[in-house]
Image (cartoon, coloured by chain):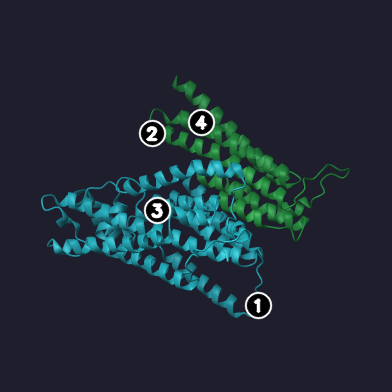
Chain colours: A green, B cyan
Amino acid sequence: MDLLLDIIASVCLIAGAFLVFVGGFGVMRMPDFYTRMHAASLTDTGGAALILIGLMLQGGLTLAPVKLIAIFLFLFLTSPTASYALANAALLSGLKPVCRNETGSALPTGQVVATGSPDAAKPAGKPAAKKTAPKKTARKKTDAKKAVKKKAAKKPAGKSARKSS
Amino acid sequence: MTIVFSLFLLSMLVLVAVAVLRTDNLFTAVMLSGVFSLIMAANFFVLDAADVALTEAVIGAGISTVLFLGALALTSEQDRSPPVGSWVPLLTSSALGGVIIYAVMQAPRLGDPNAIVHMHVAPWYLEKTPELIDVPNVVTAVLASFRGYDTLGEVFVVFIACIGVMSLLGRVRPRRETISEETFSKQSRNLRHHLIPRVVGKMLIPFIVLFGLYVQFHGDFGPGGGFQAGALVAAGIILYALLEGDTRARQLVPEWFSSVLVALGAFTYASVGVACMVMGGRFLDYSVLDPHDAIHGQHLGILLVEAGVGMTVAGVMITIFHAFARRGIR
């Protein structure tokens, strides 16, 4: 029974870690802000949920799984909201999604990747992982916005970030 | 494993610090300093300093980011400081950095039992806390009872800082007369037209405040205490202000209330000390508060003192936030 529990927990943890990795990879590689956010949302939802479930299974019948459930509910509510606020702010400030053309991406992808902070901040504790993800994308967005439109109204961006902080 | 994790966190810290310095965009800098605080909090947690980690996460990453953004709303987003060609700043900072690095070389290794800090009063605190105060969290015992004078000083520093900020930002009386439609729409600059953040935020606020109260009253047993709890409660109210607008937040927590809270907290702390003197002990010697049971007296004193700290911190945060928000409207 213990072995079975361990195996399930390990599978959950490994799958969660894989999703986090893929999410980070996507944030680096995707062509524009919206697709990047899509990749980052994989980390927030699937990755976090699987890792938390794995930890709950390892926790046994103590107080720890209850706390993990509370964290899970909190993440479940806040990270989609943060994603919504980010996407909404980006759309309102006039950032257009990139459409496919013959050469590939229209955004200076290399520049944005270069200025983006390395996504290594993710494993820095659970709340840290939750919080850095939206902030990082917010920052990336301002960079991207700078590249696309210099004088785009930036008020909504500030608001959304204020909310997510 | 802990070593790898610490190394990773510390190098992230340096990277983020350099990024904060190098960026021209102040909004980016504010966000990055929030990230910096979060990494710092994780670092403190790795070092088993849960109380400090909690404070850093709430104040550094949460409230100061909001206050920075509030300040940013009053100015522009771009850093306009001219590129200085002088060598003086470089020399000053590298000399200071050199001194710090030299000092760090002399520092004892992490967890060295022969380090000077571990030889002085720390063993005495660890040994005597169960006997004299009997609370599981030694940090709370040291902070509120053994070193009660220091904490009293800290509370008054916060109190005086609040007075300073308020005299800089100005205490303008809110106007009572009817306001025009235009001013109203300007004043209600908030997230009210965004339904999803509003609904979710409102769902979270009671839990944030509840967690703040838990941290306040559970400070004897686990990480927490007045400083963290005050900041958490203030964070809940600031979230309400961000969602519903400052005007409504000032209806929820009127300005006179938060100002009174600031003074009342500091007053509570000091008057507990005076009460100890009246009851025949020394200043902030809680043992005399209960004539029959010294340990119970200590518990009572710590509870009251922590409540004072929490009130002051929450009041200061809310007052300063309101001051910034009001400046933003005008």
Q: Which residue is mark 2?
A: A63
Q: Amino acid at mark 2?
A: Leu
Q: Amino acid at mark 3?
A: Gln
Same chain assignment for discs 2 and 4: yes
Q: Secondary structure at mark 1?
A: loop
Q: Which residue is mark 1?
A: B84
Q: Label 2 vs label 4: CA separation?
A: 15 Å
Q: Amino acid at mark 4?
A: Gly
Specify whether residue A94 is in view. Answer: yes
Q: Nearer the viewer, mark 1 or mark 3?
A: 3
Give the mark nearer the N terminus: 2 vs 4. 4
Q: Which residue is mark 4?
A: A54
Same chain assignment for discs 3 and 4: no
Q: Label 1 vs label 4: CA separation?
A: 53 Å
Q: Nearer the viewer, mark 3 or mark 2?
A: 3
Same chain assignment for discs 1 and 4: no
Please, which chain is the residue tagged with disc 3 on?
Answer: B
Residue at 58 percent of width and 66 percent of height: B330
Please, which chain is the residue tagged with disc 4 on?
Answer: A
Q: Label 3 vs label 2: CA separation?
A: 22 Å
Q: Crowdedness of circle 1 by 10 Å Cα count: few (<14), some, many (20+)?
A: few
Residue at 29 percent of width and 48 percent of height: B220
Q: Which residue is mark 3?
A: B228
Q: Secondary structure at mark 3?
A: helix
Please, which chain is the residue tagged with disc 1 on?
Answer: B
Q: Label 1 vs label 2: CA separation?
A: 56 Å
User: For this view, does A8 lie left or right of residue B257?
Assistant: right
Q: Label 1 vs label 3: CA separation?
A: 40 Å
Q: Nearer the viewer, mark 3 or mark 4?
A: 3
